[in-house]
Amino acid sequence: MTEATEDVWTAFRQRLYDYIRARSRSSEDAEDILQDVFEKVHRSVGTLEDTANLTSWIYRVTHNTIVDHYRKKQPSPTAQEPVVVVETDTSAAEQTLAPFLHDLIAALPTPYRDALALTELDGLTQQEMGHQLGLSTSGAKSRVQRGRAMVRDQLLDCCHIELDRRQHVVDYQPANSEPWPQDCACAPEPGS
């Protein structure tokens, strides 16, 4: 180990371990990743031209090493195993809620309604929508996020939504509060 690597080890070991441990599945994984990081640092620290960026460089190496560590652990298909991509159909709950979501989007203030209509209903990217509406990319993203939040809040006012791990609607039920908002997809049929 060179003197520079020893200095890096002394200065960064605990901080990097804490950083890695917060992003890893176990302390054993964290130790393995930390060792990989310092191997990479040892091999490359001499090639670093700007030592003022040493800390950010080390954290970038650490982040990439964490990602690589878990990417390696994912099983990859072998030549004998065909890769099958299964497209799941929209759930019945999503199909039932879809028309109601159109109504919620239509009820938004104009800037948010236009942004969501173009991205969520017409399929434009946020960048394309921003260009069409004369917004910067960050402004377009912000408008879509705010519009989605408004729709989500309106929906959650009347419905309890159950999502799967991919954030698809699996089921929904009326909230326990009455009266339900007019035209709520969750509201029971009149007289029931």
Image: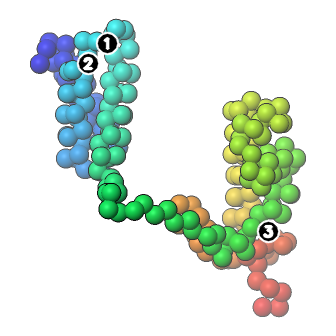
- What is the number of the mark on residue 44? 2
**For mark 1, what is the residue?**
48
- Which residue is depicted at the point 64% across and 69% down? 90
The residue sitting at 74% across, 30% down in the picture is: 136
Q: Where is residue 59 drawn, in percent x and y? A: 35, 27
Left or right, residue 40 beside residue 167: left
Residue lying furthest front: 80
The N terminus - image quarter:
top left
Classify 10 Å Cα crowding around label 1: few (below 14), some (14-19), many (20 and above).
few
Percent coordinates x, y for residue 53 in the rendering: 38, 14
Residue 43 makes an appearance in the image: yes
Separation of residues labelled 1 and 2 (CA atoms): 7 Å
Q: Amino acid at mark 2?
A: Ser
Using the numbered discs, state the Cα–Cα distance from disc 2 to disc 3 in whole angstroms. 56 Å
Query: Along the polypeptide, which appears first: circle 2 or circle 3?
Result: 2
Q: Residue at x 30, y 46 (%)?
A: 72
Relative side of 101 to 161, left or right: right
Q: Is residue 17 above or below residue 174?
A: above
Amino acid identity at mark 1: Leu
Dot 1: element: loop
Q: Secondary structure at mark 3?
A: helix
The residue pinned by badge 3 equals 99
Q: Are marks 1 and 2 in contact (CB under 8 Å)?
A: yes
